[in-house]
Image (cartoon, grey):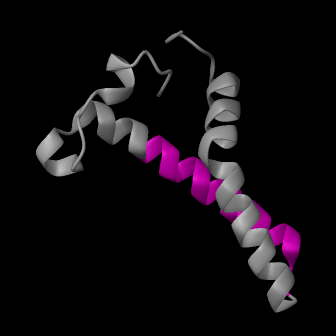
Amino acid sequence: KFNINKEAYLKMIYNKTAVLIEASARCGAILAGLYEKDFAEYGKNLGLAFQMIDDILDIKSDEKILGKPAMNDFKEGKTTL
């Protein structure tokens, strides 16, 4: 399904990518005795941004620049940006 709304897209990329970066940042904050919620929020936003950029690059770049096949998500029927 390629025509999804913003909320569905954000939920999908959160579960695909951002949740791992969020958890990593949270764990780092816990181990360092720092503000867990702030680091978790940072990790979440970093993960969302990373996945959005990856989705854009998959559409706009070529294999030579990406180092992987371009339009791969589209070819595999994966929902992206």
Looking at the image, residue 3 sits to the left or right of residue 20; the answer is: left
Looking at the image, residue 4 sits to the left or right of residue 52; the answer is: right
Q: Relative to residue 76, is residue 11 depicted above or below?
A: below
The one nearer the camera, 62 or 60, is 62
Q: Quarter of the image holding residue 40?
A: bottom right
**Residue 47 position within the rendered picture, expressed as x and y whole percent measured from the top left:** 59, 54
**Residue 30 position within the rendered picture, expressed as x and y whole percent measured from the top left:** 86, 80
**Residue, x 32% and y 18% (percent of image)?**
75
**Residue, x 12% and y 47% (percent of image)?**
64
Q: Quarter of the image holding residue 55?
A: top left
Going by the picture, which residue comes out furthest to the left? 64
Q: In this picture, which residue range is highlighted in magenta?
A: 34-53
Number of numbered discs overlaid on the protein picture = 0
**Residue 1 position within the rendered picture, expressed as x and y whole percent measured from the top left:** 54, 9
Q: Let me know if residue 80 is in the magenta part.
A: no
**Residue 65 position within the rendered picture, expressed as x and y whole percent measured from the top left:** 16, 50
Looking at the image, residue 10 sits to the left or right of residue 79; the answer is: right
**Residue, x 23% and y 48% (percent of image)?**
66
Q: Relative to residue 42, is residue 81 depicted above or below?
A: above
Judged by its main secondary structure, the magenta piece is helix
Q: Relative to residue 34, is residue 70 depicted above or below?
A: above
